[in-house]
Amino acid sequence: MGMSVQEKEGRTQVTIREIAKEAGVSLGTVSHVLNRTASVSEEKSRAVLEAVKKLGYKPNQAARMLKNKNSKTIGLLLPDIGNPFYAELARGAEDMANSHEYTVLVCNNDRNPEKEERYLSTLANKQVDGIIVVKLANSVEKLKQYFAPKQIVLIDSEELPCERENSQIQMVNLNEREGASIAMNYLYHNGHRNIAHIAGLLESNSSRERKREYCDFMKRIGVSEEQLVIENGTYSYYGGYQAMKTILNRNPEVTGVFAANDLMGMGAMQAIQDSGRRVPEDISVIGYDDIEPTEYCTPKLTTIRQPKYEMGQYGMALALKALGEDQVTLPLLPRNFLIVRQSVQRKR
Amino acid sequence: MGMSVQEKEGRTQVTIREIAKEAGVSLGTVSHVLNRTASVSEEKSRAVLEAVKKLGYKPNQAARMLKNKNSKTIGLLLPDIGNPFYAELARGAEDMANSHEYTVLVCNNDRNPEKEERYLSTLANKQVDGIIVVKLANSVEKLKQYFAPKQIVLIDSEELPCERENSQIQMVNLNEREGASIAMNYLYHNGHRNIAHIAGLLESNSSRERKREYCDFMKRIGVSEEQLVIENGTYSYYGGYQAMKTILNRNPEVTGVFAANDLMGMGAMQAIQDSGRRVPEDISVIGYDDIEPTEYCTPKLTTIRQPKYEMGQYGMALALKALGEDQVTLPLLPRNFLIVRQSVQRKR
DNA sequence: TTGAAAGCGCTACCAA
DNA sequence: TTGGTAGCGCTTTCAA
């Protein structure tokens, strides 16, 4: 009869009202069959479903939002989606959300508190049902101010100061300490005792946590504070290179190096090789992050892999569960793990 | 289930109605001062603004959407945000959108047509005002079917088949040919005539376009089809390594290599060095993409940089302009450009 | 310049 | 099981 589906869609939105007319039932009935919110007779139910298909009906989310006071949307606020670490985390969160019919609104704060605050405001406005913030740049108070009664999940390298009890805030810890501990243990169990650390950017929490664990670990195995070998590598390849050069000069006794990220680990390997020594025969190196180039360098860098994707999944699952989506199964708490490649060897 | 949450929310949203009461004016008046849609007396206007501030009023976007039939949201559908190329493009799009009070909903189709179609449906539902699709996995018809009268911007490596005139579809070309042409010209102007090509994945448009330009360029400088040297490297490091080994064996006359991406370029350099030859003294290599590791390898890889961020900006500007946001200034059409590093040298 | 009121499309309550 | 109906918060028309 006249118009094709496309044409009809093209002009005006098909509403529940038209479905009702087409199927010869009332608005309420249509709503009920669409939402399975009451039992409807087989007959009418089929009529509605047919009308829906015929007219190409799509529920208007705006109307639903207005009525239900939810948007089936979760905000995800992170430092920078261009960083593969956060990109993978975002994928995990997104996939988890999608499998429960939720949508994710991803925003980058560029580690800039003002930009973050603008997003906080926008997201609160956009009626997101909950928000996941990775490495919050503002204070927890600020965050609560905008998201007052809504669900909040914080993902960070360290515990943030906020009352744990009766709070709508949940924390996921990135577990930097655990990862660093795995790295140190691996060097230790390979016989290394003179272990140096190439630290990352002092400003970053993750860097601080990794360094802290290095210190604690060394202390635990009986090394005094003054004997710690720590150089700063600013998380960059050249930083790692320079830091390693310094270590080679000042601490020739070092046989194991724990670099706070892979880039510095690779730089360190280069410095060792340039000095005529070999990796891992003379000095073992372990990195952190498991970025792609660790596969291409010589030797391939042994490193710590963070469960980025799983962290995202986990955080999202937490948020959805708190929103009352009780068919959500919370995944196991993701753990860091060791990726054994070629750059660490038993001390000779 | 959600009940406890609802109850806990307790304090209800501040609505325009409460503002009206507080300010002692009518609903319409409040709306008018908020939207500057009619002139309101100085006195009442101030009263409204004060009430807004006092009660912390935030307009309900759902209600606005319902009434205005727009969401100030643009969908961005791309293969995979985990790929730095798309991540940067997304940032460009996002920044452009944000500066005009629009929000971006980013979705990954994983190059999977079914997944993409699900998103098409979700996005159409979510009342996005327009959609930007990077490397559409479905047909243009399918896309139009979902987004019938809405604004559509397509970003792709090649022209997609769709009527250009009077269409609500706009195309942005990734200009692979231009980039490949720059690479080939650079080798050519450095005296190279025996140029080999390491091609990427045959399935990908970008790879095909780059290869096509290699062929055309060689033809233009008088090389016959049979003399072309093309090996497949599947876009991977090892693929590039193997491809280069084959070339070294079969075509020792080659002095210049154009790799369809940086990973293969780096693999090729390794193969050349492993064979006892030098880069760039004996053989010059140029890559494509300008990924980070090109800075760490030896020698540093000369390459082509795609204006990813700018492409995203441009595509978004196109969409916003089409939506009637006329204060949007369309940026210059972004171009590919050469990044000169160390891997190409004048032929000796 | 202002206020009243009619919806936008949907859900959910109540009565039948 | 069904239908009627009252809003959700906002914009906008129409009178005043």
Image (spheres, coloured by chain):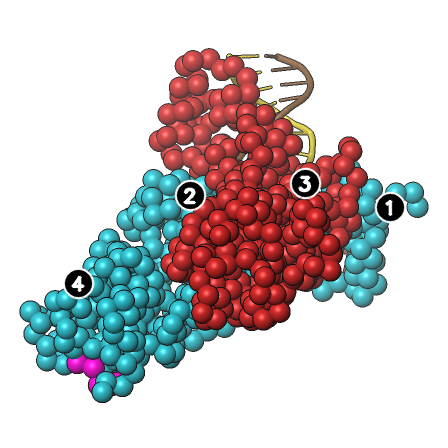
Chain colours: A cyan, B red, C yellow, D brown
Marks 1,4: beta carbons within 8 A: no
Q: Which residues are magenta?
A: A189-193
Mark 2 or mark 1: which comes first in sequence?
Answer: 1
Q: CA distance from mark 2 to mark 3?
A: 30 Å
Q: Chain of mark 2?
A: A
Q: Chain of mark 1?
A: A
> Who's the residue at 57% across and 47% down the image?
B188
Q: CA distance from mark 1 to mark 4?
A: 75 Å
The residue closer to the viewer here, A88 or B300, is B300
* Label disc, if present, on residue A4 of the rendered structure: 1
Amino acid tagged 2: Tyr
Asked if marks 1 and 3 fall on the same chain, the answer is no
> Who's the residue at 52% across and 42% down the image?
B337
Q: Main secondary structure of the magenta part?
A: loop
Q: Is residue A226 above or below residue A204?
A: below
Reading the image, the residue beneath label 4 is A246
> Who's the residue at 55% across and 56% down the image?
B256
The residue closer to the viewer here, A224 or A125, is A224
Q: CA distance from mark 4 to mark 3?
A: 53 Å
Amino acid tagged 1: Ser
Q: Is residue A184 above or below residue B130?
A: below
* Label disc, if present, on residue A119 of the rendered structure: 2
Q: CA distance from mark 2 to mark 1?
A: 42 Å
Can residue B187 be seen from the camera position used here? yes
Badge 3: how crowded within 10 Å, few (<14), some, or many (20+)? some
Q: Position of residue A219 (x, y in %)?
A: 12, 76
Q: Position of residue A154 (x, y in %)?
A: 36, 58
* Label disc, if present, on residue B171 of the rendered structure: 3
Tell me if B337 is positioned left or right of B69 in this view: left
Q: Is residue A329 above or below residue B291?
A: below
